[in-house]
Amino acid sequence: MFDAIVIGSGMSGGIAAKELCERGLKVLVLERGNEVRHRQDYQDMVMPWDMPNAMMVNEEELARDYGVQRECYAVNSLTKQFFVKDSEHPYTTPEDKPFAWIRGYHTGGRSLMWGRQSYRLSAMDFEANARDGHGSDWPIRYEDLAPWYSHVESFIGVSGSAEGLDQLPDGDFLPPFEFNDGEAMFAAAVAAHFDGRKVIPARVANLREARDHHRAMGRTQCQVRSICERGCSFGAYHSSLSTSLPAAFATGNLTLVHDAIVDSIEHDPATNRVTGVKVIDRVTKARTTYQANIIFSCASTIGTAAILLNSRSEAFPRGLANSSDQVGRNLMDHLYQLLTVGIYPNGPDSYYFGRKPGSMYIPRYRNLPGQEREAFLRGFGFQGGFFRTGGASTAIGQLGIGEGLKAGPRQLGPWLSYLGGFGEVLPNPDNRVTLSTTETDQWGIPIPHIAAEFGPNEFAMIDRIMEDGRAMVEAAGGTVLFQKSDPGKFGLGIHEMGTARMGVDPANSVLGQWNQAHDVPNLFITDGAAMASSGCQNPSLTYMALSARAADAAVSMMAEGVL
Amino acid sequence: MLQLADLDRRALLARTLALVGASAAASACQTLDAVAPLEAGADGGLSARQMATLRAAAGRIIPQTDTAGAIEAGVPERFAGLLAAWASPASRTALVAVIDRIDALPGGGLPFAVLPAARQHELLAAFDAEAMRPSGTFVLAFPSTRELPVDPDYARFKDLVVALYYMSQPAMTEELRYVHVPGRWDPSIPVTPETRPWGETVTI
């Protein structure tokens, strides 16, 4: 019997476990995947010329086992062990609604491979549902989460610059990775041509400098290699493995069990409390039930929804904590892969040393309070890159052979930029996860059926994203090389969220202001499922802040005898 | 500084697709990778003649100059290794067929591999010029579309040779520059005649 069970060791679960352990609870973390050991199981120290198959995954293996994961930019022969084999973890979608579910099942989950972009939601974001009527009103506002954003940023280490923007609040930052001269040129041009629009250094969970408490955990400053998704032996970016779980283990209160796939959560109707978690061993398929006083589901958005839906009972015929019928619904992601690529023949004649782990970000500047309303609701930001061409890519696809071909790559070429729009997706109850009634996985658990599509608001936003991308490139003296205006598949943003959303009204939401299930007081959900709206900001920082806040609240409730 | 007018626009587009495809959603900075050492016996099933043709073709695509060329950098062996460990049967068939077509280039009755280097260059350059002509057919290629050359199999063969070269140790450290652990970020350094681009990931 544990004080708390946390389902999932990833981005949310790691923080929840740390915060619960630090408050004296005996915590069991159940991780469905295999163990990955910090440093020992990373391949970041392998020299480039010693890597298998030019970093390519065997073609047949890629097609057979990674049919969905292969769509993710981070999949290669050095990282494939961090991505699920789709052949072993099937799901279904309607034929006309493809969904790319990118994930990894191992210690730390996707916190090992994430892009580390860390942005706060703003007051405007927490008010959005109430203002325009889409989705459930968030039961919290920015002021409620602000101290927890600071708490998490300080703990994990986020590099960024203070910009004073209401729509993208500043955080508790380490120094930013400074702009290279191309980025600086672009930022100056955007500021000069577009009133109130800013290009800022990307805010990334990398240690630009290591503070004492980072060093005390064995983490050191970022070595500027930009191979984070392989795992970092320097512990220089935040992952559950480098940061949260070690902190939890240091308390002596953590038990971490791997290969523990959660089938369902047990509920006692007499007390209206969840009492335990039914687990199937990934390898042996043996079944075990673990019990605890409180349960945090941090199994990721679709994982949590599937567990709740599979936890039907007489008390909850539609799934645990689902009196609202919102579990599985309101699945959101971000518009993604909306690209504008530009080339700058007259950029600054300079270069840079190092491969910094984040480039530039353009915070949302449309549909801000007081502005004229666009043809769409909500808004978008851009993540971008700005670098000198030259080297190997100069020769790929090039006509000619011989000395002429070889001469090109040794010269620095023009600066090139890409801007990727990240657009907010509205909550839509028909975008939902259900469980198959006919198919199960190899552990006998019904597989998820994911049916989601972008709506009219998203498509109206795309035109503006493309227009603005072009305008900014041209304002900075660039020429647009190409644009991609059809978004990546739903899910490819890898920001899926919303399937057990927070809300004021229990009739249309699953969780209250403390991420506590309206229906079951000792069940907490703090992964992406909790999100009532998506914002346009990368969401992991918000998941972590919600996890820390909810853990603190849960422990207080236990101390007060409420739980 | 290269001028935009100096660059073939289609080739530039192909280069940027390769760059952006690897990192479109991540930071602008390049990750690095390279090639596996060739395992003993991992010759991709190529005959001695095919291996000789591959070696000769690689040496003409990226010749030795003041720095190592493809042969010196071990590209032919690494290419054969890819055939053995990476390529699907369909890819292997297509790539080996390219080697055979290069072998069959009109060398006055002699195989390509035994011709003088200058003649090899002449034949392969003409073959390349024809094969790499834009076809007018576009295919979806993340993150955008790519115009296929008239001979996409040859283009893929050549791209692999080029990529394997630039991901070899000699190329990354002598032709270009590479530091595995930079240890610092310096956002602005002057360009000098000695400046070379940093080695980078090549998405093929």
Image (cartoon, rainbow, N blue to C red):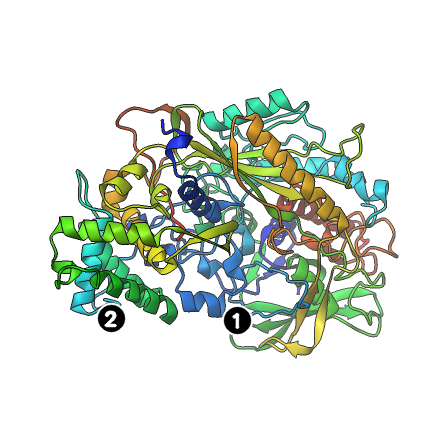
Front-most of residues A82 and A63: A63
For label 2, the crowd category at 10 Å Cα-Cα, with few meaning under 14, some 14 to 19 and many 20 or more, is some
Residue designated by label 1: A87
Label 2 in the same subunit as label 1: no
For label 1, the crowd category at 10 Å Cα-Cα, with few meaning under 14, some 14 to 19 and many 20 or more, is few
- Side of A127 where B39 appears, left or right: left
Task: Judge depth for marks 2 and 1 and give the one in front.
Answer: 2
Up the image or down, B66 lies above or below A427; here it is: above
Residue designated by label 2: B45
* Residue at the image point whose x is 82% and y is 53% from the top: A562
Pick the quarter of the image with the N terminus of chain B: top left
Q: Within the image, what quadrant is residue B188 found in?
A: top left
Instruction: Report the number of numbered marks.
Output: 2
What is the number of the mark on residue A56? none
Up the image or down, B180 lies above or below B4; here it is: below
- Residue A476, percent from left and from top: 54, 26
Q: Is residue B184 visible?
A: no
Tell me the kind of residue under disc 2. Answer: Gly
- Residue B56, percent from left and from top: 18, 56
Give the farthest residue toward the top: A192
Tell me the kind of residue under disc 1. Answer: Ser
Q: Are marks 2 and 1 in contact (CB under 8 Å)?
A: no
Q: Report how far apart the C-alphas of labels 2 and 1 lie in the structure.
A: 29 Å
Is disc 2 placed on a helix, strand or loop?
A: loop
Q: Chain of mark 2?
A: B
